[in-house]
């Protein structure tokens, strides 16, 4: 999006420059204005990402530092207090496995484990996770060895298009650890916060039941 806006401004700058019917002074003046606009754009874009404290205060934002552990690795994040854990994972830590679906906590695609409990990362501010242990889909495998739940999903063809799969797997792990759901109906109800638009529910059910039997 930022790249497109930058390109558009470049295009507009070229189109706005009169190539005929103007004096040399007018032409050079407009070239200078267009160049200044183009040169300022990356700085404005960068300012959105790294907001100086003075600028943040002027806009009523707050920059905070939070310490948490992601997939076993200690992380220190300095960011806008309004940044969600999901955006911090995807944009700051290059962990895109947790998917952004509805961004309102309704589809479950962003589910991660926070201190062992399944949570929608789009509903948690990163600043709220001070000292927390966060596990994402990227943290489940042991090297090349997949987690048993990942293997079960593959075995039972429970991932279909794959977009919701990371959230489904993290939620399934939380379900098994909670130990409340045992029947098919209970598992379905417990997993109802994770929406699969491809309709892989039966396969997901079979995968969870297999891992439950191993636990």
Image (tube, rainbow, N blue to C red):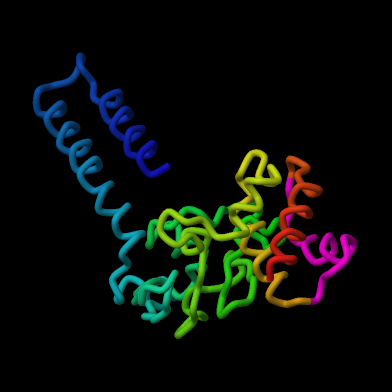
In the rendering, at what x and y percent does residue 190 appear?
A: 80, 66
> Quadrant location of residue 113?
bottom right
Quadrant of residue 160 within the rendered picture: top right
Could you tell me which residue is drawn at 38 percent across and 39 percent down? 5
On-image quarter of the N terminus: top left
Residue 15, x across and y down, in percent: 30, 23
- 90 up-or-down from 180: above or below: above
Classify the position of the C terminus by image quarter: bottom right
Image side of residue 102 versus residue 206, left or right: left
Where does the image place residue 9, in percent across and percent down from the top left?
Answer: 32, 35
Residue lying farthest to the left in this orientation: 24
Residue found 69% across the figure and 62% down from its top: 211
Q: Which residues are magenta?
A: 180-196
- Residue sitting at the far front: 214
Q: 30 or 94: which is nearer to us? A: 94
- Taking depth in this image into account, of 196 and 64 the one nearest to the observer is 196
Q: Is residue 8 rendered magenta in the image?
A: no
Q: Position of residue 62 (x, y in %)?
A: 41, 78
Residue at position x 63%, y 46% in the image: 154
């Amino acid at each position: 999006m930022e790249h497109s806006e930058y390109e558009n401004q470049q295009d507009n700058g070229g189109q706005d420059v009169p190539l005929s019917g103007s004096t040399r002074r007018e032409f050079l003046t407009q070239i200078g204005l267009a160049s200044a606009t183009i040169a300022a754009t990356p700085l404005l874009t960068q300012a959105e990402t790294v907001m100086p404290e003075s600028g943040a205060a002027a806009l009523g934002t707050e920059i905070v530092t939070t310490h948490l552990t992601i997939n076993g690795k200690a992380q220190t994040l300095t960011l806008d207090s309004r940044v969600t854990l999901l955006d911090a994972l995807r944009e700051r830590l290059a962990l895109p496995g947790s998917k952004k679906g509805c961004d309102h906590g309704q589809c479950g695609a962003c589910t991660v484990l926070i201190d062992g409990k399944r949570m929608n990362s789009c509903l948690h501010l990163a600043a709220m996770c001070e000292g927390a242990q966060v596990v994402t889909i990227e943290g489940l495998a042991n090297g090349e060895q997949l987690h048993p739940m990942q293997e079960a999903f593959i075995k039972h063809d429970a991932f279909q298009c794959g977009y919701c799969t990371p959230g489904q797997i993290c939620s399934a792990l939380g379900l098994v650890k909670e130990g409340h759901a045992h029947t098919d109906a209970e598992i379905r109800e417990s997993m109802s916060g994770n929406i699969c638009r491809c309709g892989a529910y039966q396969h997901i059910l079979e995968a969870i039941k297999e891992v439950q039997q191993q636990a």
